[in-house]
Image (cartoon, rainbow, N blue to C red):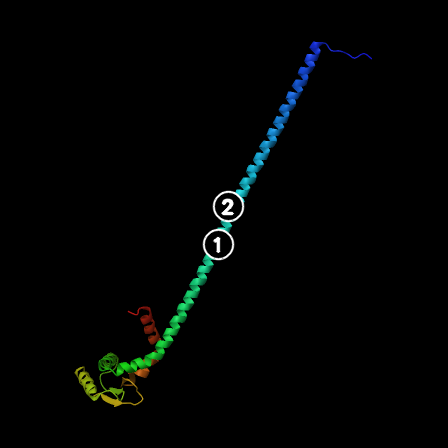
Amino acid sequence: MNVPTFAPPVQASLQALLELVDTDRERQCAQVLGEAQARAAALRSQAHAEARKRMRQTFVEQRRALQAQVAAAQARLATQQRLQAQQRTSLLLGLARQQLPAALQARWSQPAARAAWVARVLDVAHARLPAAGWRIVHACDWPAEELATAAAGLAQRGHADPAFEADAAIAAGLKVVASGNVVDGSLAGLLAEADEIDAALLRLLENPS
C-alpha cells in the first residue's frame, strides 16, 4: 500500500488550519469561561445584596422588637411605681386618720390653738347663721374666761345673749345652733368631714413644706 505524501505547501496549509482551529477553540473557551465567570460574579453580587437586605431587615425587626420590649418594660415599671405610690399614699392616709383625733384633741388643749379654733368656728357661724338665737354647745373644759371673751366678741358683732351649754359628749371644740341650722366645729363634727380631711391630708403629703 502506498502512503500518500503531501507536498510541503499543503502540509503548511494544514498546520495553519489546525492552529486556526485551536485558536478559535481557545477563544470560544475563553468566551464561555468569561461569560460563566460574569454570571457567577453577578449571582454572587445578587446573593450578597439579598443577604445584606435580609440582614438589614433582620436588624430592623430586632430593633423594633427590642423597642417594643423596652416600651413594655417601661410601662410595667410606671404601673408598678404608680401602684406603689398609691399604696404608700393609702398607708400614710390611714396613719394620719388614726393620729388626727389625738392631734386635734392636743390642739384644743393648747390656749393659742384653742382660741384660733373657736375664732374660726364663730367666724363661719357669723357668715352662715342668723344673728339672733344662738346656742353654743361646747366641750366642758373650755375655760370660763375664754368663754366670756368669746361672748363679748359676739356681742360686738351683733349676736346678743348667746346661750352657752357645756356638753360632756363633746371631747373638744364647739358647735353653734341657730334656727335649726348647725355649724359643727366639734371634734366629732370635724372628723365627720372625711372627704375634706383626706383632701387636706393629701395636700400636706404632696407639699409637706
Quadrant where the C terminus is found in the figure: bottom left
Answer with mark 1 or mark 2, whichever residue precedes in sequence: 2
**Residue appearing at x 44%, y 62% in the figure:** 77
| Count of labels in the image | 2
Q: Nearer the viewer, residue 78 or 190?
A: 78
Q: Nearer the viewer, residue 164 or 92?
A: 92
Give above or below for 55 relative to 167: above
The local crowd at label 1, few if under 14, some if 14 to 19, many if 20 or more residues have their Cα within 10 Å, is few
Q: Name the image quarter holding residue 200.
A: bottom left
Give above or below for 85 relative to 18: below
Residue 157 in the image, given as x and y percentages of width and height: 18, 81
Q: Name the image quarter holding residue 116.
A: bottom left
**Residue appearing at x 31%, y 83% in the figure:** 187
As helix, strand or loop, the secondary structure at mark 1 comes to helix
- Residue 25 horizontal side relative to residue 56, left or right: right
Mark 1: amino acid: Leu
Mark drawn on residue 66:
1
Mark 2: amino acid: Arg
Residue 185 in the image, given as x and y percentages of width and height: 28, 82
- Tell me, yes or no, if residue 156 can be seen here: yes
Q: Nearer the viewer, residue 189 or 55?
A: 55
CA distance separating discs 1 and 2:
15 Å
Mark drawn on residue 18:
none
Write down the residue under mark 2.
Answer: 56
Residue 145 in the image, given as x and y percentages of width and height: 19, 87
- Residue 67 horizontal side relative to residue 126, left or right: right
**Residue appearing at x 35%, y 74% in the figure:** 198
Quadrant where the N terminus is found in the figure: top right
- Tell me, yes or no, if residue 194 can be seen here: no
Residue 188 in the image, given as x and y percentages of width and height: 32, 83
**Residue appearing at x 41%, y 71% in the figure:** 87
